[in-house]
Image (cartoon, helix red, strand yellow):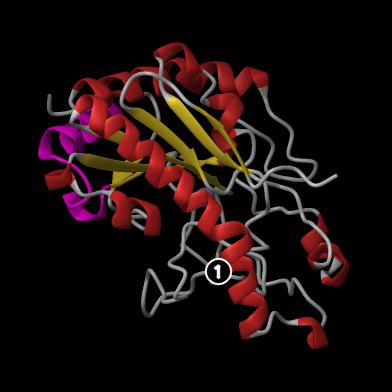
Amino acid sequence: MNPPIYTLTSGTVPLVVSIPHGGAFLPEPYAGAMTPAAQIVADTDWHLARLYDFTHALGGSMLEANYSRYVIDLNRPASGESLYPGQTTTSLCPTETFRGEPLYGAPDQPSDADVATRVDTFWRPYHDALRAELERLRALHGHVLLWEAHSIASQLPRLFDGQLPDLNIGTFGGASCAPSVHEAAAASAAAMPFTSVVNGRFKGGYITRHYGQPEQGIHAVQLEMSQCIYMDETAPFGYREDLAAKIQPHLKHMVENVFAALPR
Ligand SMILES: [Zn+2]
């Protein structure tokens, strides 16, 4: 049986951790049309619900997608326009992996009608749930922090040069949150025993840019984490308890710091 489109755990404090690329499930009929390279879903943001498990103890909400980004990328606008014009990036319904391997055989590329079906089936329900949860918490508390949790392989020559910093904070140049929130994220990252950058290659995707409306009380911060700091970057992409134990307390502290910087 297919899983639900997303898993939402609702909390009580104004913190929402969104994991739009956490899903690894490839449903039929898409899976049957995809290549062997697609089937290993290498570009999943693996194990983030586990790494961010402390969210529940903090009283926050967690929203995680259950379907692979190869079906549809929830962190792209439904219109399909590029987030990084002029740069190599992946599309709403990707046709290649991050390494450039085709996801489909030549006759099986998604048609426009197929993309529209995927938007209705997978994209809208996630965004409807995210919007509703943000609005619920904003109504109760006035301001809410949307933490966009992502991770990616540390070396992907098609997408960026060399080794990615361990922690990549994105606030869309400071536009997606209040200055206090942006500064707390930057200061927390700088204080951690990991390499970091703010608004570097990853400035925040569609969700950060679209929902991050600080003047409306919604403050969005994206953290794109290098996968080498908590997991194996080759199949079967195992969680590394030994590595995760080093980053997880710092990650929790960072989320707490940024949450504490939310305007009241
Ligand atoms: Zn991601």
Of all residues, the one furthest to the bottom in this rendering is 107
Count all numbered tags in the image, as a single digit.
1
Query: Residue 29, image x and y in percent?
Result: 83, 67
Give the percent coordinates (x, y) of residue 69: 62, 57
**Nearest the eye: 183 or 124:** 124
Q: Name the image quarter holding residue 192.
A: top left
Residue located 46% across and 64% down the image: 76
Q: Tell whether 175 sits left or right of 145.
A: left
* 135 is within the stretch colored magenta: no
Q: Residue furthest top?
A: 57
Q: Main secondary structure of the magenta part?
A: helix
Q: Identify the residue at horizontal 66%, vertical 44% (top origin).
A: 66
Name the image quarter holding the C terminus.
top left
Give 242 or 92, whichever is nearer the viewer. 92
Which residue is the site of mark 1? 158
Q: On screen, 228 above or below 77?
A: above
Q: Position of residue 105 (x, y in %)?
A: 82, 80
246 relative position to 134: left or right: right
Residue stretch rendered in magenta on the structure: 171-188
Mark 1 nearby-residue class (10 Å; few <14, some 14–19, many ≥20): few
Between residues 150 and 108, which one lies in front from this camera angle? 108
Is disc 1 placed on a helix, strand or loop?
loop
At 31% from the left edge and 51% from the top edge, which residue is drawn? 211
Circle 1: residue type = Arg
